[in-house]
Each structure stands twice: as structure tokens, then as C-alpha cells.
Image: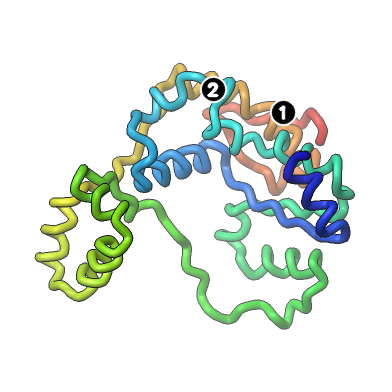
């Protein structure tokens, strides 16, 4: 039994929120996260050679992911939100979300929303990986890094790794990925609307066709 089937058994009346972002942005972010975690050692183009059976690609196929849940939950109980609308108009996006889950808009947070970026992600060398994989050592490393003067903490950072460079996807691989994502985005637009799912792939517009 899959995840949606188990979820509906446990919480048959649940409202679900599905937060998505541009498929290429999500894919690159996923790759950088895995590099930072020390799990991914390959370059991004090597990691994307086989796009037919590829976790980076599958997680960005949102309509396909969504279709599995639509087999278990009614359409009106699944709310699709993009990270782009949440970043650009957080108050408006949260107001719509609150309306969906039945929470008063008076509960909207008053504090500024902090946006997490991937600029601080690092590619650890052997020393850095040893520290990260040794819990007590990792805790001490993080503690003292926050206490040291910047010049010394920067020196230690250079000794344990380097920032993860923004990866560049080879044009031929990107073209193959675009063909995979194009129909998926079109189907997602039918679910939420083209005015919300306004992602572009290269210089092409995504046709308003398909269904979820």
C-alpha cells in the first residue's frame, strides 16, 4: 500500500497543502542539498544522465505526484501553492491558504518572513565529512564556529570544505528535462490556473493542455 492510501486510512478527512516551485529550481536545490549532506559525489550532469528513473526528476514532476493523491482525496481538499507566490505576496498567499484550512485571516503572522537560500550550502572535504558524521564532534564544531572571530571561523571553513558552486546543466540534458516537465506543467496549470503556474521552460511557453 502506498503513502496516499495509508494517509487516507489514518486521516480520511484531512486537508492537504502541496507546496511546489519551478521544477528546475527545485531539482538544482535538491542536488545542492544532497551535495551538502555528503550523499551526492557526482557532478549534476552525471547525476542526470538517466532521467527516466531519477529521483531528482521524479520529485519535480508535480502533476504526476499529485495524481496519486487525487486517487484517494477529493480535489477540493488538496490546495496547491507555489513558493513563488508565497515569496512574492506572502500575506495574500497565506490569506488564501488560511481560507482553505478554515483559519481566520486575523491569525496572519506579523513578523517578517525569512527566506532560506542555498548560498550557505557547502561541499565538505574528507575532514568536513568526518566532522559531520561524528555527532558529538559536529555539535562542538557548530558551537565553536559561532564563538570564534570571523577570520578564524572563515579559515576553519576553508579547511573543512568550500561553498557549493551553482551547478550548470548541460544544454542537451536540459532539453531532455524540458520535454519531461512541459506536459507535467501543463497538467498542473489545469489544476490551479495558468496565472499561478506561470513557469517558463527556456524561451518556450507551456501550452495550456493536459489534465490532472
Measuring from the top left, give residue 103's x and y in whole percent. 78, 75
The correct choice, above or below, for 10 with respect to 200 in the image is: below
The residue that mark 2 highlights is 51
Where disc 2 sits, the SS reads loop
How far from the left and from the top, in percent, is residue 126? Answer: 21, 43
Mark 1 element type: loop
Label 2, label 1: how far apart the Cα atoms are: 22 Å
Q: Is residue 125 left or right of residue 63?
A: left
The answer to which image quadrant residue 116 occupies is bottom left
Which of 32/83 is in front?
Answer: 32
State whether residue 181 is above or below residue 25.
above
Disc 2, disc 1: CB below 8 Å? no
Which residue is at a point 46% across and 19% down the rendered structure image?
49
* Rendered view: 51 above or below 19: above
In which image quadrant can residue 16 be found?
Answer: bottom right
Name the residue: 24% across, 49% down: 130
Q: Which residue is mark 1?
A: 207
Q: Quadrant of the C terminus?
A: top right
Observer-nearest residue: 199 or 138? 138
Q: What residue is at 73 percent from the left and 45 percent from the top?
A: 3
Label 2: how many Cα within 10 Å (few below 14, some 14–19, many 20+): some
Compared across the picture, whether 49 is left or right of 168 comes to right
Q: Residue at x 18, y 56 (%)?
A: 157
Amino acid at each position: 500500500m502506498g503513502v496516499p492510501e495509508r494517509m487516507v486510512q489514518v486521516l480520511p478527512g484531512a486537508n492537504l497543502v502541496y507546496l511546489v516551485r519551478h521544477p528546475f529550481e527545485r531539482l538544482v536545490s535538491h542536488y545542492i542539498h544532497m551535495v551538502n549532506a555528503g550523499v551526492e559525489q557526482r557532478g549534476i550532469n552525471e547525476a542526470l544522465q538517466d532521467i527516466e528513473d531519477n529521483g531528482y526528476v521524479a520529485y519535480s514532476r508535480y502533476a504526476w505526484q499529485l495524481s496519486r493523491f487525487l486517487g484517494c482525496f477529493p480535489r477540493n481538499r488538496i490546495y496547491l501553492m507555489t513558493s513563488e507566490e508565497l515569496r512574492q505576496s506572502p500575506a495574500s498567499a497565506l490569506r488564501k491558504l488560511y481560507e482553505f484550512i478554515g483559519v481566520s485571516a486575523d491569525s496572519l503572522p506579523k513578523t517578517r518572513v525569512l527566506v532560506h537560500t542555498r548560498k550557505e550550502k557547502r561541499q565538505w572535504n574528507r575532514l568536513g565529512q568526518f566532522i559531520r558524521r561524528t555527532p558529538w564532534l559536529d555539535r562542538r564544531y557548530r558551537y565553536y564556529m559561532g564563538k570564534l572571530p570571523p577570520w578564524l571561523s572563515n579559515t576553519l571553513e576553508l579547511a573543512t570544505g568550500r561553498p557549493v558552486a551553482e551547478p550548470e546543466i548541460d544544454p542537451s540534458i536540459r532539453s531532455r528535462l524540458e520535454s519531461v516537465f512541459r506536459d507535467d506543467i501543463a497538467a498542473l496549470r489545469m489544476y490551479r490556473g495558468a496565472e499561478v503556474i506561470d513557469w517558463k521552460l527556456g524561451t518556450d511557453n507551456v501550452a495550456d493542455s493536459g489534465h490532472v
